Image: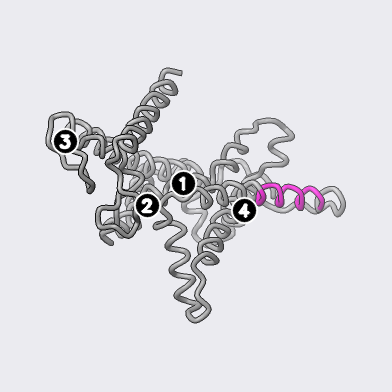
């Protein structure tokens, strides 16, 4: 409860500072202007010591303090993202294995993150990627917490993975459609996918598409799976059961674990 209240207060103050920046007319709204203000940085515009347009400069102790807090937030967010991925994959696929497997998993997860960082992209783009992924996966993951016989029969690991995949592919398709160029098909696919995940500037419709498509994917799988089960008596296997047939997977997975839920 304390953490929830503290989060609400911090988010409110950050958003309110942005409103103050808009009220103080220190925001440049023109995207084509060299002094255009990124909407995610409105908070820092309050630190200006004058009402000129352009990016804010740190010129006081409070500015240094805010920048330090922002750096701490960035590092903690990335650290939580990396640890969360590593812990989830390790607990599911490397259960009962030596700690060295978990450490290797951390290194493997950091490879694409390091590659992304070396591409000299704005740090806000990295947060955008994680926010989009979280939006695609929030509903199926939360539904996975439905701990009851009915919930376990409807929401399986296969339905959750399918829901996340549908959301990710739908977001890519939406970005490609908005950036489609009939004269350059491959270029449109690359540009649209990049825009959807890295350059959409937190446009609300991309997040809405991700959220709604994940719900639609989850419902689609549940309906089809239940129809096949009730009418034809067909019940598929879980993804973990399929992965166990891959040569070498038994070296990583804990075969002593209970079989995964069906599809």
Q: Image check: 46 left or right of 94?
A: left
- Residue 239 falls within the magenta-colored stretch: no
Q: Earlier in the sequence, mark 4 or mark 1?
A: 1
**Which of the numbered marks, if any, corresponds to residue 109?**
2
Q: Nearer the viewer, residue 178 or 198?
A: 178
Q: Which residues are magenta?
A: 216-227
Q: Are marks 2 and 4 in contact (CB under 8 Å)?
A: no
Q: Is residue 223 magenta?
A: yes
Quadrant of residue 15 in the image?
top left
**How much space separates mark 1 and mark 2, taking CA atoms?**
10 Å
Q: Could you give the CA–CA distance between mark 4 and mark 3, rounded to whole angstroms?
A: 51 Å
**Element type at mark 3:** loop
Query: Cβ–Cβ below 8 Å for labels 3 and 2?
Result: no
Is 166 in front, or is 161?
166
Give the number of the mark in front: 2 or 4: 4
Q: In the rendering, which numbered label is found on residue 89?
A: 1
Q: Residue at x 69, y 30 (%)?
A: 148
Q: Nearer the viewer, mark 4 or mark 1?
A: 4
For the point 37% across and 41% down, the residue is 83
Q: Earlier in the sequence, mark 1 or mark 2?
A: 1
Front: mark 3 or 1: 3
Question: Mark 1 falls on what kind of element?
Answer: helix
The mark found on residue 49 in the picture is 3
Q: Mark 4 highlights which residue?
A: 162
Q: Residue 105: x, y in percent?
A: 38, 50
Disc 2 element: helix
Q: CA distance from mark 4 to mark 1?
A: 17 Å
Q: CA distance from mark 2 to mark 4?
A: 22 Å
């Amino acid at each position: 409860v304390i953490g929830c209240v503290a989060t609400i207060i911090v988010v409110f103050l950050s958003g309110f500072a942005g409103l103050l920046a808009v009220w103080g007319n220190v925001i440049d709204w023109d995207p084509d202007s060299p002094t255009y203000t990124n909407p995610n940085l409105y908070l820092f515009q309050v630190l200006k010591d004058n009402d000129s347009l352009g990016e804010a400069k740190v010129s006081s102790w409070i500015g240094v303090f805010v920048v330090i807090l922002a750096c701490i937030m960035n590092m903690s967010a990335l650290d939580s993202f990396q640890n969360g991925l590593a812990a989830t994959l390790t607990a599911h696929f490397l259960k009962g294995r030596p700690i060295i497997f978990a450490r290797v998993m951390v290194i493997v997860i950091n490879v694409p993150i390091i590659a992304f960082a070396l591409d000299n992209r704005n740090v806000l783009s990295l947060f955008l990627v994680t926010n989009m992924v979280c939006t695609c996966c929030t509903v199926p993951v939360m539904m996975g917490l439905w701990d009851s016989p009915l919930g376990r029969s409807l929401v399986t690991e296969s339905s959750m993975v399918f829901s996340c995949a549908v959301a990710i592919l739908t977001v890519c398709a939406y970005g490609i459609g908005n950036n489609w160029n009939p004269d350059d098909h491959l270029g449109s696919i690359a540009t649209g996918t990049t825009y959807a995940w890295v350059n959409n500037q937190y446009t609300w419709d991309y997040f809405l598409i991700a959220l709604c498509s994940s719900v639609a994917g989850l419902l689609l799988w549940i309906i089809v799976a239940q129809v096949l089960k009730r009418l034809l008596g067909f019940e598929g296997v879980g993804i973990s059961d399929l992965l166990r047939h891959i040569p070498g997977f038994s070296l990583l997975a804990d075969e002593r674990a209970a079989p995964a839920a069906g599809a």
